[in-house]
């Protein structure tokens, strides 16, 4: 009976040891997977940051170009307005 109890004790010790080893292996795998996911997320974040910066630059360029276009249109409209005023004045002088 005593041999049987010591045999059961040894088996339970080995199974406990195997359980701890399995737990640490699983923990290591999960940590490795989470680190790989973090690296991918950092890479994606950096790519998105670059894209946002490029988009901001494009928006700034578009704003500058729109300002130039508005200034050009404004001067053209001013010229058209003055030309129409001159034509109106000439027509009123002829009448």
Image: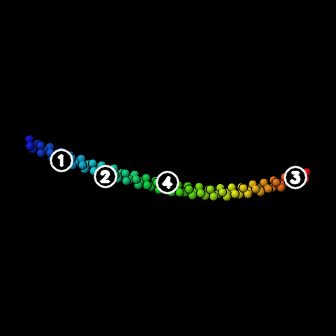
Distance of label 3 from label 2 (alpha carbons): 92 Å
The nearer-to-camera label among 4 and 3 is: 3
- Residue bearing the label numbered 4: 48
Residue at the top extreme, as displayed: 1
Please tell me which residue is depicted at 34% across the width and 53% down the height of the picture.
Answer: 32
Could you tell me residue 21's position as x and y percent? 25, 50
Q: Which residue is mark 1?
A: 13
Given residues 39 and 79, the one toward you in this image is 79
The picture places residue 59, in percent across and down from the top left corner, at 59, 55
Q: Find the distance from the CA under tag 1 to the CA under tag 3.
A: 113 Å
Q: Earlier in the sequence, mark 2 or mark 4?
A: 2
- Residue at left 34%, top 52%? 31
| Disc 2: which residue | 28
Which label's residue is closer to the chain start, 1 or 3?
1
Instruction: Relative to 38, say whether 12 is above or below.
Output: above
Q: Which residue is mark 3?
A: 91
| Numbered mark located on residue 55 in the image | none
Residue 65, quarter of picture:
bottom right
């Amino acid at each position: 009976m005593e041999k049987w109890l010591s045999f059961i004790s040894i088996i339970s010790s080995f199974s406990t040891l195997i359980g701890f080893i399995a737990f640490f292996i699983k923990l290591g795998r999960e940590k490795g997977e989470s680190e790989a996911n973090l690296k991918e997320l950092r890479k994606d974040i950096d790519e998105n940051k670059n894209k946002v910066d490029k988009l901001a630059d494009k928006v700034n360029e578009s704003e500058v170009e729109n300002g130039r276009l508005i200034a050009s249109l404004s001067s053209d409209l001013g010229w058209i307005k003055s030309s129409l005023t001159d034509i109106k004045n000439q027509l009123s002088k002829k009448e």
